[in-house]
Image (spheres, rainbow, N blue to C red):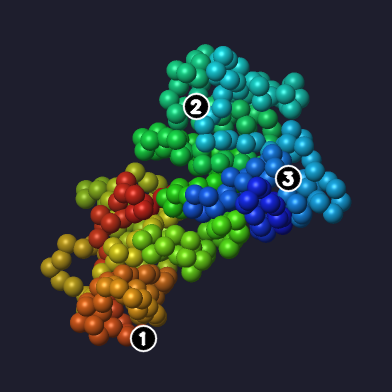
Amino acid sequence: MLSVDIAARLGDFELEARFEAPASGVTALFGRSGAGKTSLTNILAGLARPSRGRIALGDRVLFDAAKRVNVPPDKRQIGYIFQEGRLFPHKTVRANLAYGLGRLAPEQRAARFDEVVDLLGITPLLERRPKTLSGGEKQRVAIGRALLSGPDLLLMDEPLTALDAARRAEILPYVEHLRDVERLPIIWVSHDVDEIIRLADHLVLIDQGRVTASGPLIEIINGPDFRAATGRREDGTVIETTVAAKDAANALTHLRFPGGELRVPGVNVTLGQRLRVHIMAKDVAIALDPPRGISVLNCLAGRIVGISDPDGADVDVEIDVGVRLRARITRYSARLLALKEGQTVHALIKAMALDRTGRNRSGTPGT
């Protein structure tokens, strides 16, 4: 487990962070640009020094101000992947990867090299130079070089930011595979909601240099701290589901969750696979009775457990459908339906609103 409790002053910027990250899986460090994510990541890597506090990785203390412990970056056994690949331009991919092998025993190097190359699908790239690679290919090589250094922790500082949508789609499955196969703790720095829903198990929120919340991803992302960090525009509900059936004839997948089933487009999944579904509050409609003669495929019966009435034209309604689902409707609609807490209603969600190719609407692989 990574344990962090530090404070630092970096120029005019003050940073305070206290959290713990699990010993395996992805912990997302999430916040707006300028929140302090990269500053905190540099401190974890040993590239910047806190003014007080302690950092420990398992039973190894990396920094302890009181005991005057500050392990140098090259001794921390941490792999750091930056926004750009930062590969040696004059070396081949093979030579870039081999640069990370120095920490391994000579008899382990060949097998580990082949293992990592296969994991990241970069065998065809080995004799090429970085200038001939796409952005996604460069990042896969950078990840491979970091892995071959034998790290106890991977830091990935917004590694997809410089990539276009196609290159992001190319690299994300490799990161998922890395997460599931290597079982290393990974700190994934991002301000992209889709990325953290897809990859992370644990979430740390940072705002204006302060960690405001940390814990299991589903718990934090469905809670008030995340809504405060992202604003109402990104508001929604993330649900853990399991693939229950595939309807190839209609190109639909049935997903089971504690409140019933959802139908979503696409069948390129495996029965029993765990998927996360992000349902935007603005994509949920409310009916008093089960509708008939309607194209909407998902109708979930539930009970209203909360109604918020902020200033403006809309109202947020929280419905217990086995999980707590948020809906955003107009103030006029809420008055027309005379909605109140305790009332039984039906939440309507278009299947296409859960299209896995849509931004912030993706049913994305869980862990």
- Quarter of the image for residue 259 reads bottom left
Tag 2: residue type? Lys
Tag 3: residue type? Arg
Q: Earlier in the sequence, mark 2 or mark 1?
A: 2
Q: Earlier in the sequence, mark 1 or mark 3?
A: 3
* Element marked by disc 3: loop
Cα distance, mark 2 to mark 1?
A: 54 Å
Q: Is residue 103 left or right of residue 81?
A: right
Q: Residue 330 at what x, y percent from top left?
A: 25, 73
Viewer-proximal residue among 226 and 274 = 226
The residue at 30%/64% (across/down) is: 282
* Element marked by disc 1: loop
Label 1 sits on residue? 342
Q: Residue 277 at what x, y percent from top left?
A: 39, 57
Label 3 sits on residue? 49
Contact, mark 2 vs mark 3 (Cβ under 8 Å): no
- Quarter of the image for residue 319 reads bottom left
The residue at 62%/36% (across/down) is: 80
